[in-house]
Image (spheres, grey):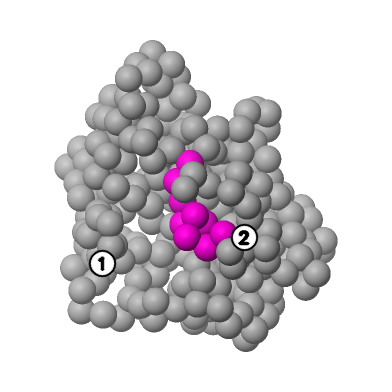
């Protein structure tokens, strides 16, 4: 069976907490390009596309992504579910992978692992992620779904949080979808203690330190390389540890049936 696998990296310039974060430079390169270069190292054959808004505020982002040789699709600013669906339709994808642009330290091996699990079980699962429950350090987010499942969600999801965050409709409706989860094979669970995601200035300082120490010598440094660095220099963790475990769930605990307060810091 031929699968057209489409990896969609959602990005925009108008982040409420940290505007323009995706174009901030580390080691002379915009952070979004670092992330795309990392994703592009995966072994699975995919089409990689940045999906951003059709607003003027994202024109500069589009220009820089294209200058660096990556494709861009533009769609709705706030209805991310629609933006993913329209991109999937445009590229005629049978499998869609959602990776947010605030994961500049994402390990390509983790993406391959989740994709392989999905491919091996696609007759069983509509949706597979490594987030429900999460075990990897925050910032290795991979969610995979079939086009038919995405279409189902696009047609039926009505809550604003389901449209804005793209995938809650899947895991909030386990009776409608068959859902798989990939746990970190290490047996470790670091999602609430290790924060490799980019949402605040402190996160940027942490990510910059990791790149400054690892990237020049080894462009494709891994998750284990980062953990080794943190063992050697534990003080780096203090740069953004005040946000470890903090995620968007905290604002929606009343609305989410399948998420509880143990999965986010308030």
Q: Name the image quarter holding residue 171.
A: bottom right
Q: Can the viewer see residue 155? A: yes
Between label 1 and label 2, give the one nearer the viewer.
Answer: 1
Q: In the picture, which quadrant includes the N terminus?
A: bottom right
Q: Nearer the viewer, residue 186 or 161?
A: 161
Q: Residue shown at 53%/47% (left/top)?
A: 264
Q: Is residue 156 left or right of residue 212?
A: right
From the viewer's perspective, is residue 182 above or below residue 194? below
Residue that mark 1 sits on: 14
Q: Quadrant of residue 155?
A: bottom right
- Residue 221 or 101: which is nearer the viewer? 101
Query: Where is residue 48 shown, x and y percent of the image?
Result: 45, 61
Q: Residue at x 50, y 67 (%)?
A: 165
Point out the residue furthest to the top here. Answer: 232
Residue 251 is inside the magenta segment: yes
> Which percent across, then down, holds residue 244?
43, 38
Viewer-proximal residue among 214 and 4: 214
- Residues rendered magenta in the picture: 245-253
Q: Is residue 217 visible?
A: no
Q: Is residue 144 left or right of residue 79?
A: right
Residue 8, x across and y down, in percent? 47, 64
Position above or below: 172 against 229 = below
Q: Residues within 10 Å of mark 1 (few under 14, many from 20)?
A: some
Q: Are marks 1 and 2 in contact (CB under 8 Å)?
A: no
Q: Is residue 229 magenta?
A: no
Label 2, secondary structure: give it.
Answer: strand
Which residue, given by chain and number where applicable, does mark 2 sit on?
144
**Image x and y of residue 86, in percent:** 49, 81
């Amino acid at each position: 069976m031929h699968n057209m696998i489409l990896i969609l990296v959602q990005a925009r310039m108008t982040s409420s907490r940290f505007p323009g974060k995706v174009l901030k430079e580390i080691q002379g390169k915009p952070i979004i390009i670092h992330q795309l270069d990392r994703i592009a190292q995966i072994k699975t054959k995919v089409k990689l596309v940045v999906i951003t808004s059709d607003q003027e505020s994202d024109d500069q982002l589009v220009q820089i992504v294209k200058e660096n040789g990556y494709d861009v699709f533009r769609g709705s600013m706030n209805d991310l579910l629609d933006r993913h669906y329209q991109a999937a339709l445009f590229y005629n994808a049978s499998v869609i992978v959602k990776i947010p642009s605030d994961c500049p330290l994402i390990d390509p091996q983790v993406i391959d692992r989740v994709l392989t699990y999905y491919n091996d079980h696609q007759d069983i699962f509509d949706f597979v992620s490594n987030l429900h429950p999460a075990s990897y350090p925050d910032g290795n987010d991979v969610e995979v779904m079939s086009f038919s499942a995405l279409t189902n969600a696009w047609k039926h999801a009505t809550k604003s949080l389901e449209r804005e965050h793209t995938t809650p409709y899947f895991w909030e409706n386990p009776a409608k979808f068959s859902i798989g989860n990939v746990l970190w094979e290490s047996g470790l669970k670091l999602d609430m203690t290790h924060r490799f995601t980019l949402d605040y200035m402190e996160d940027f300082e942490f990510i910059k330190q990791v790149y400054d120490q690892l990237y020049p010598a080894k462009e494709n440094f891994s998750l284990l390389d980062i953990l080794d660095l943190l063992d050697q220099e534990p003080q780096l963790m203090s740069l953004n540890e005040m946000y470890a475990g903090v995620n968007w769930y905290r604002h929606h605990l009343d609305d989410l049936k399948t998420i509880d307060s143990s999965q986010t810091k308030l």
